[in-house]
Amino acid sequence: MVLKLKFQETENEANLLIQRLNITSLPVCPFYIAKEYGIEVQPKDSDKPGVSGFLMRQGDSFGIMYATHIRNEGFIRFTVAHELGHYFLPEHPEYLFPNGDGIHMSRSGFISNDTCEKQADHFAKSLLMPDNLFLTALREAGEGFAALKSLATKCKTSITATAIRFTQLVEDPVAVIMSSGNKIEWCFVSEALIQIKNLQRLNKGSLIPPGSATSEFNQNQTNVLQGKQAEAWTHLDDWFDKAPQVEMKEDVVGLGSYRKTLTVLFTSDVIDSEEEDDYLEIGNEDRGWKWK
């Protein structure tokens, strides 16, 4: 069985659920949604590396469990929303439980290459941060990491999920980049950057620009583990080959025990790409980039 849903369709399913339940304010509570559909949610010990949640099925009854090693409230809520994605998305229950009853282990949080897991991640992101409600909050949130922190608090979501959602709806040129050591893990960019003529993408494993604030920050693992922050100025073409030479603000924050660093590149200026005509051509279906 092949899952054919596009990511935008998974997000539409989440928005339809928000409408059905008449949810009109943030934060959206996945525990409430589960209760409304008779799905019990409980914590569960797990020693499986990378496993964050479980969806269980017995006949027509479903249950959700989240791993007790998760300490971040935002990630717990995202994990529960991810499992709700498996429950609500068309074909997922049949795909995950071909023989009827069973337990599915999930690796949520945009760390899996599996199509089923990625679809549930996109559903969770849109469920917890619905288009209209999130966009209203975004317009009042400001810029850079301060905006992400404000939105994450308002939505009770993780910084990572908030950053990805932010790039989908923000009008300004913004890139959010996850890194470890001197290498990039993934990158999402806003529509304003996607529209730059043939902007070259950042691949997983690409090197962080030497001399950038992120590069210097990552040289000291204490910065990452203690969740320290840094601010600097950079240029877009330092990060993206053959991009226009546009000055960008660079906010950097360590993600603690996750052992990763989140970088936010942003500017409120309009970038005119018509002057540049020698980029490499790429495609992008998800209004942002992510490679694993």
Image (cartoon, grey):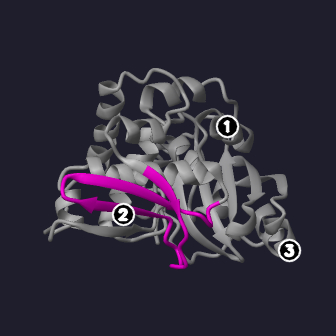
The residue at the point 24 percent across, 60 percent down is 58
Q: Is residue 60 magenta?
A: yes
For marks 2 and 3, the one nearer the N-term is 2
- Residue 81 in the figure: left or right of residue 184: left
Mark 3 — residue? 220
The disc labelled 2 sits on which kind of residue?
A: Glu
Query: Which of the two labelled residues, at mark 1 and mark 2, occupies the earlier sequence position?
Result: 2
In this orientation, does residue 48 appear? Answer: yes
- Answer yes or no: is residue 6 visible: no
Helix or strand or loop: what does disc 2 sit on?
A: helix
The mark total stands at 3
Q: Which residue is mark 2?
A: 117
Query: Mark 2 against mark 3, which lies toward the viewer?
Result: 2
| Residue displayed at 17% across by 56% down | 91
Disc 1 residue type?
A: Thr
User: In the rendered structure, which segment of residues is drawn in magenta?
Assistant: 41-70
Find disc 1 in the rendering and name its residue: 153
Task: Give the mark, 1 or 3, whose residue is nearer the N terminus.
Answer: 1
Figure quadrant of residue 67:
bottom right
